[in-house]
Every structure is written in structure tokens, then in C-alpha cells.
């Protein structure tokens, strides 16, 4: 799949309280995180998204359109909500940038963009 170019929408995710979860469920957290990652990769890829960074439990992805990013977020939240998490429920914040960005050529990460995941949270599994 080609990298998104032109007008691009970025999507950012973060597990709520992941540090506390990792401390409480030290032995089980790797399996929970693996399943979380599988769900997010699938939701993003089905909507033609490109995961350009995964750091710990946070994802950064790019999409050709804002609607693809929105559909990926909804698909991910539904899959996360329907997952039989045990012993800890995984809740994920998902945010997208506003507005979209125009990208040409070389891809690089931008710390200011990644901070959007915390400041413009669009939806959360509750």
C-alpha cells in the first residue's frame, strides 16, 4: 500500500492508565498489549491507513482521508469494546489531528502532532 500523500489525516491512540495496568498486571500485560496491537493494526489497515510509529501502547497512523481515519477509530473502538479483556479492561483514547496536513516526500514523525492524542481525544472506550 502506498504511503498517504497530499492531504493527510493523522490518528493517534493511547491506552488509558497503561502504566498502572503494567504495574498491577505485570505478567499479563504483554499478552493484553499484543491483543491491543492486533486490533489496532487490523482496524487501521482495513481503512487503508499506514501505521508509522508504535511506541509502547501508543499508535500513530496516517490516512488518505479524514473519513478513513474516523472509520478506523470507530472500528477499533468497537473491536476493543467487544474484546473479552481479562483480568483488566483495556480502554483506549483515540484522537485525530485537526485540520488535515499536506505531506510531500519524506515521512518523519512530529512530536507536536503526537501530542494531539492527549489533547484532542475524539473517543474513548468506557
Image (cartoon, rainbow, N blue to C red):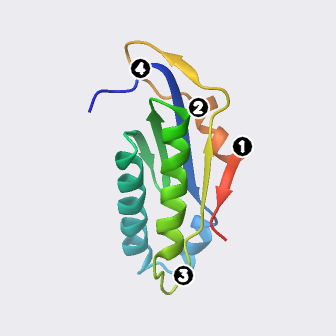
Q: Are marks 2 and 1 in contact (CB under 8 Å)?
A: no
Q: Position of residue 20 (x, y in %)?
A: 61, 72
Mark 2 → mark 4, Cα distance in angstroms: 19 Å
Give the side of residue 67 with respect to residue 61, left or right: right
Reply above or below: 71 against 4: below
**x and y percent of residue 3 in the render?**
34, 27
Per the rendering, the mark at residue 88 is 3
Helix, strand or loop at label 2? It is helix
Front position in the image: 19 or 6? 6
Q: Residue at x 47, y 78 (%)?
A: 26
Q: Of the two numbered discs 2 and 4 on the same chain, state the one appearing first in sequence.
A: 4
Which residue is drawn at the image coordinates 65% and 61% (left, top)?
A: 124
Q: Which residue is mark 1?
A: 120
* Residue assigned mark 2: 111
Q: Are marks 3 and 2 in contact (CB under 8 Å)?
A: no
Q: CA distance from mark 2 to mark 1?
A: 14 Å
Give the secondary structure at mark 4.
Answer: loop
Q: Is residue 102 above or below residue 41?
A: above
Tell whether label 1 touches label 3 (CB within 8 Å): no
Q: CA distance from mark 1 to mark 4?
A: 23 Å
Amino acid at each position: 500500500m502506498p504511503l498517504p500523500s497530499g492531504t493527510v489525516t493523522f490518528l493517534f491512540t493511547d491506552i488509558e492508565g497503561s502504566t498502572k495496568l503494567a504495574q498491577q498486571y505485570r505478567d499479563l500485560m504483554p499478552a493484553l498489549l499484543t491483543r491491543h496491537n492486533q486490533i489496532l493494526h487490523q482496524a487501521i489497515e482495513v481503512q487503508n491507513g499506514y501505521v508509522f510509529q508504535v511506541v509502547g501502547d501508543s499508535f500513530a497512523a496516517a490516512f488518505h482521508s479524514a473519513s478513513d481515519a474516523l472509520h478506523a477509530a470507530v472500528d477499533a473502538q468497537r473491536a476493543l469494546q467487544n474484546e473479552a479483556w481479562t483480568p483488566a479492561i483495556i480502554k483506549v483514547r483515540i484522537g485525530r489531528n485537526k485540520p488535515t496536513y499536506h505531506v510531500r516526500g519524506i515521512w518523519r514523525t512530529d512530536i507536536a502532532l503526537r501530542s494531539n492524542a492527549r489533547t484532542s481525544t475524539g473517543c474513548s472506550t468506557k
